[in-house]
Image (cartoon, grey):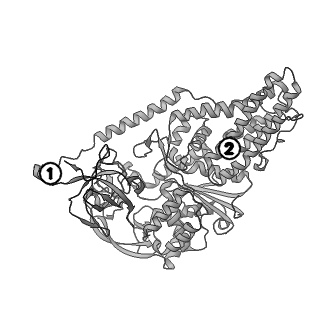
């Protein structure tokens, strides 16, 4: 396996947030990969603990509770149970599915904070934050609502606009007001505790950039970007009444910030699972792997390791595999727009097809780039791969054994060259399958496992036992013996990916689960062993079942369009004289260079050739465009805008853009290559 030898494994899966159910994006990004890896380790006979649980604190939960007129506890109880039940029905093999509202977690998180506080690891800061005088409470950013300055959405939050996806601050909102009382908030002084991440930059650089170059490029690259931009102290407390109270004097009305509290949930879950929890968290011969979503990279690779380092005594993750995003029918999955395939609904609407979803989400996993889930592809993969390849081979091998030998495994006679070639080809799959799983290449690993079924199908198609039985019945005994050995191997190879189907194969073979080391063997099925009754491993999915899902999404799309159409359209601005318009000097320009501005999330520094000169422009588009995709683009630039200094750069001009209804920015430029400096008017 890995070059360093480990005695045990700790596998953590990102804690799903308990303000809604789990959807296929979560599954493809985190939970299916985590379960494949965990099941593989167990088949290898490794000492492995897999932990997960519901993340139950934070502002979004209190907002949802307030909207529904219930308590936050009622919200988290509801969704914790939905998520836990859905995971169990899908076959997720967590050793424990815990929750951050548990007494163990409250004690663990409090003790963790207190140790860092007592050792002076935090920085206390007093700042001005928004306060609701009517409700007499400080407002977290999510409790401040106003109009988004980017897209005009009048229901944007103080930290994000869920319509266009822009990251915001309360100061940027137009007409901000309190989501609690509706009043206009004022600023008041408040004190919070901060983890000085800047003090851990050297440690993080050595640990990640030098020590873990093998990490996936998206994880390594995002960490490098954050470190190169310079880390800032991060708050670990919030003014809120829902969460774990800050365990120090003078902290009344303050709770631990959810992103300090949540990852400690991995530790408390392990504590609840076993009294030997410390050997999984504090032994250098334990390999810890975090399975997370793309949007959680910073917290698991920068913040949580800094917390563990500050505390001392804990191991750090050996790897943090993270996938990209999964889209749905060409559109971004969105909880707020209900544009998703919810796991609990899928399980109700496709009973007995748990493995089909597991298979499709792994086969189409967004491991290196964003990918798209479509219902037509789902149907095609089921019918053309699971039914026609895997199911077809297993069924033929078992049915022919029943038909010709009354279900008794026939003896294997002398092997010919083709038999030996087939067995050798099957045996070579093991090495590739192991390597791909251990390097978190689960799509390729699934192809390896399915390749065994393809080898088996080809073997039966080429040897044609249904014809040979008429002329050489002894030869058929060898053919079906080999086919049954391949079937037994399939039960091993597919178990991490499709556990229900593996169990079904074992039942039809009437055998117990095999150890992973048996993969590649051709003596798994003993001569004269009686197999069970054959049954179909998979069934075709008909067009009407798929159409129901497409109709469901179409109804969602129409509801979203109606909601967007009803939103307030920004009024026309004040009329201006033609002479004022004439004053604007807009030129076709080419972007020569582009780079992120250090210590900012939104700003890019661009060098543009305006035809007049080459100049620098600072533009707040870093969340919409990468520097690489901008270089060489022709754009329209307002060149005679009064210069303004931004983050140490004199910005001379403005890039012109348009914004879609969904908040996506579009660069304006000529349809065809145009000379730089051409005047637009």
With respect to residue 162, does 469 lie above or below? above
With respect to residue 111, does 413 lie above or below? above
On the question of residue 483 being in view, the answer is yes
* Lower sequence index among marks 2 and 1: 2
For the residues labelled 2 and 1, say whether their Cβ atoms are less than 8 Å apart: no
**Residue position for label 2:** 448
With respect to residue 235, does 451 lie above or below? above
Assess disc 2: are there few (<14), some (14-19) or many (≥20) residues with their C-alpha within 10 Å of its C-alpha: many
Classify residue 176 as left or right of residue 15.
left
Q: Quadrant of residue 362?
A: top right
Residue located farthest toward the bottom when viewing the structure as drawn: 119
Q: Which mark is residue 581?
A: 1
Residue 338 locus on image (x, y percent): 42, 42
Residue located farthest toward the top when viewing the structure as drawn: 470
Q: Which residue appears at 69% of the width and 42% of the height?
A: 449
Classify residue 599 as left or right of residue 357.
left
**280 and 423: which one is in front?**
423
Residue 319 locus on image (x, y percent): 60, 60
| Number of numbered discs visible in the structure rendering | 2
Q: Quadrant of residue 286?
A: bottom right
Q: Which mark is residue 166?
A: none
Residue 93 locus on image (x, y percent): 64, 50
On the question of residue 148 being in view, the answer is no
Classify residue 182 as left or right of residue 282.
left
**454 and 7: which one is in front?**
454
């Amino acid at each position: 396996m890995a070059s360093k030898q480990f005695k045990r494994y700790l596998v953590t899966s990102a804690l799903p947030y308990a303000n809604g159910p789990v959807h296929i994006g979560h599954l493809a990004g985190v939970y299916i990969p985590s379960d494949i890896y965990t099941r593989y380790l167990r088949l290898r006979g490794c000492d492995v603990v897999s932990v997960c649980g519901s993340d139950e604190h934070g502002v979004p939960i209190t907002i949802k509770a307030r909207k529904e007129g219930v308590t936050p506890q009622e919200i988290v109880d509801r969704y914790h149970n939905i998520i836990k039940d859905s995971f169990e029905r899908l076959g997720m093999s967590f050793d424990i599915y815990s929750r951050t509202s548990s007494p163990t977690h409250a004690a663990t998180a409090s003790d963790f904070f207190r140790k860092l506080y007592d050792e002076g690891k935090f920085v206390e800061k007093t700042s001005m934050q928004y306060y609701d005088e009517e409700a007499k409470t400080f407002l977290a950013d999510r409790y401040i609502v106003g109009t988004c300055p980017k897209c005009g959405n009048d229901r944007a939050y103080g930290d994000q606009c869920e319509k266009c996806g822009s990251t915001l601050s309360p100061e940027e909102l137009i007409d901000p007001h309190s989501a609690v009382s509706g009043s206009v908030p004022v600023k008041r002084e408040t004190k919070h505790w901060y983890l000085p991440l800047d003090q851990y930059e050297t440690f993080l650089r050595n640990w990640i950039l030098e020590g873990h170059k093998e990490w996936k490029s998206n994880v390594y690259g995002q960490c490098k970007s954050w470190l190169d931009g310079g880390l800032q102290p991060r708050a670990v407390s919030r003014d809120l009444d829902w969460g774990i109270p800050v365990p120090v004097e003078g902290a009344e009305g303050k709770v631990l910030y959810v992103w300090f509290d949540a990852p400690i949930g991995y530790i408390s879950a392990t504590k609840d699972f076993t009294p030997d929890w410390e050997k999984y968290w504090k032994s250098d011969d334990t390999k810890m792997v975090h399975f997370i979503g793309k949007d959680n990279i910073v917290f698991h690779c920068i913040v949580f390791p800094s917390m563990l380092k500050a505390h001392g005594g804990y191991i750090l993750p050996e790897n943090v595999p993270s996938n990209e995003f999964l889209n749905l029918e060409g559109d971004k999955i969105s909880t707020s727009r209900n544009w998703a395939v919810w796991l609990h609904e899928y399980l109700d609407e496709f009973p007995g097809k748990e493995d089909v979803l597991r298979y499709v989400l792994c086969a189409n996993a967004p491991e290196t780039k964003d990918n798209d889930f479509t219902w037509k592809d789902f149907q095609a993969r089921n019918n053309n791969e699971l039914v026609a390849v895997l199911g077809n081979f297993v069924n033929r091998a078992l049915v022919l054994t029943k038909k010709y030998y009354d279900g008794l495994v026939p003896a294997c006679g002398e092997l010919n060259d083709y038999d030996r070639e087939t067995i050798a080809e099957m045996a070579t799959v093991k090495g590739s399958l192991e390597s791909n799983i251990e390097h978190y290449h689960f799509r390729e690993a699934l192809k390896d496992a399915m390749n065994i079924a393809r080898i088996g199908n080809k073997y039966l198609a080429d040897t044609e036992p249904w014809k040979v039985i008429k002329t050489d019945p002894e030869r058929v005994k060898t053919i079906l013996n080999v086919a049954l050995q391949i079937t037994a191997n399939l039960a091993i190879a597919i178990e991490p990916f499709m556990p229900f189907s593996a169990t079904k194969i074992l039942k039809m073979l009437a055998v117990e689960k095999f150890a992973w080391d048996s993969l590649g063997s051709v003596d798994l099925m003993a001569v004269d062993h009686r197999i069970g009754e054959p049954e179909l491993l998979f069934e075709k999915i008909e067009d009407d079942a798929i159409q129901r899902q497409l109709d469901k999404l179409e109804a969602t799309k129409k509801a979203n369009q109606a909601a967007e159409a009803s939103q307030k359209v920004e009024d026309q601005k004040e009329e201006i004289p033609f002479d004022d318009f004439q004053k604007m000097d807009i030129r076709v320009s080419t972007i020569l260079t582009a780079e992120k501005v250090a210590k900012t999330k939104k700003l890019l520094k661009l060098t543009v050739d305006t035809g007049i000169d080459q100049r620098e422009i600072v533009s707040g588009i870093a969340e919409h465009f990468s520097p690489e995709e901008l270089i060489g683009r022709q754009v329209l630039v307002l060149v005679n805008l009064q210069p303004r200094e931004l983050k140490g750069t004199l910005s001379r001009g403005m890039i012109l853009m348009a914004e879609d209804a969904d908040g996506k920015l579009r660069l304006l430029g000529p349809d065809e290559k145009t000379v730089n400096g051409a005047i637009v008017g």
